[in-house]
Image (cartoon, rainbow, N blue to C red):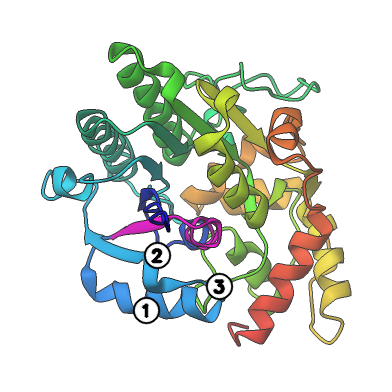
Amino acid sequence: MTMPTPTPDRVLLTGISGFLGGHVALGLLETGYIVRGSVRKLAKAEAVRDTLARAGADVSRLEFVELDLLSDTGWDAAMDGVRYLQHTASPFVIDLPEDKMELIRPAVEGTERALNAALKAGVERIVLTSSMAAIAYGHEKSRTRPFTEADWTNLNGRGVNAYIESKTLAERRAWEIMRDAKREADLTAINPSAILGPLLDEDPGTSALMVKRLLDGSVPALPRVPFVIVDVRDIAEAHVKAMTTPDAGGRRFPMGERSMLMGEIAQIVRKAAPSRKVPRLPMPDWAVRLYALFDRDVRGILNELGVLKALDSRSAVALLGRPLIAADDSITATTHALIENRIV
């Protein structure tokens, strides 16, 4: 007697059209899940399907629903038959808005809608894409020890901008919702730093814009802006494994492979694309401070100039069962992808 093949588990993935969301979808499909991806407009669905198909995914197990972080419409229906929630959708901008609530409101309210609908539907495990921004800011600049899952950004500290506040408030709200439901053990937060790595389509995402600017000449000199780099492939795999790894529940996973200044990143980009005119000249701090008098976004990074932060990623390494991909490889992959996709 032939036993029926069990139906694969269904995962609701918010933000599937994003850089990270696409890689998470790819990992879920490769693992055998049915993926129900949310987009703000269903018109985006075919482009996402084509992108994942080109990457080698079996898109026969791919579904789409239309959801908005600022609307109650559709959330209950989207959770029908869903076993796991991957909530990667959140606003991320380069130019900070004048009204910080343009970032904070969709981040927090979107988290509330996603988690409350998941709890109502009895979803077993929720994986939330948070950020290093919820861990490592508003602290003393003199701190040298790595930031861990026990650390939280101090929203009353210096240099906390609207994006940092939005990520911190959204993650804190997620834990609050799960505590109130007595289901803290069913939430996992992934807290990545700046995400680089191969692109799935012509959309460079947000973090890759930093590499794009080094390649296209829009950055004439190199300020001492610090970055902690992590690869999108590691972050996506961590999301997938966190769904079913028992001791991942109730925990946060900081993820960053290496801390470096923009000048160091430029050296790697230059090596990966030797025919491109990547800037070499350092920009002194005084020049950055002068420029900040006329640019609100630059003012937001002044407190971080030259401050190299480190994340304790040992828990993420244990979750993956291997070391993180080297930051040099992530930067190189981003550089090659930007050129191959003719984005620069």
For disc 2, the marked residue is 17
For the point 77% across and 46% down, the residue is: 324
Point out residue 30 in the picture as x, y percentages from the top left corner.
Answer: 55, 62
Three-letter code, disc 2: Ser
| Residue 231, disc | none
Which image quarter is the C terminus in? bottom right
Point out residue 22 in the picture as x, y percentages from the top left corner.
Answer: 48, 63
Region in magenta: 23-38
For disc 1, the marked residue is 47
Q: Residues within 10 Å of mark 1 (few under 14, many from 20)?
A: few
The mark nearer the N terminus, 3 or 1, is: 1
Number of marks drawn: 3
Q: Is residue 66 left or right of residue 325?
A: left
Mark 2 near mark 3, Cβ–Cβ under 8 Å? no
Quarter of image, res 157: top right
| Secondary structure found at label 2 | loop
Mark 3 near mark 1, Cβ–Cβ under 8 Å? no
For disc 3, the marked residue is 200
Point out residue 11 in the picture as x, y percentages from the top left corner.
Answer: 37, 49
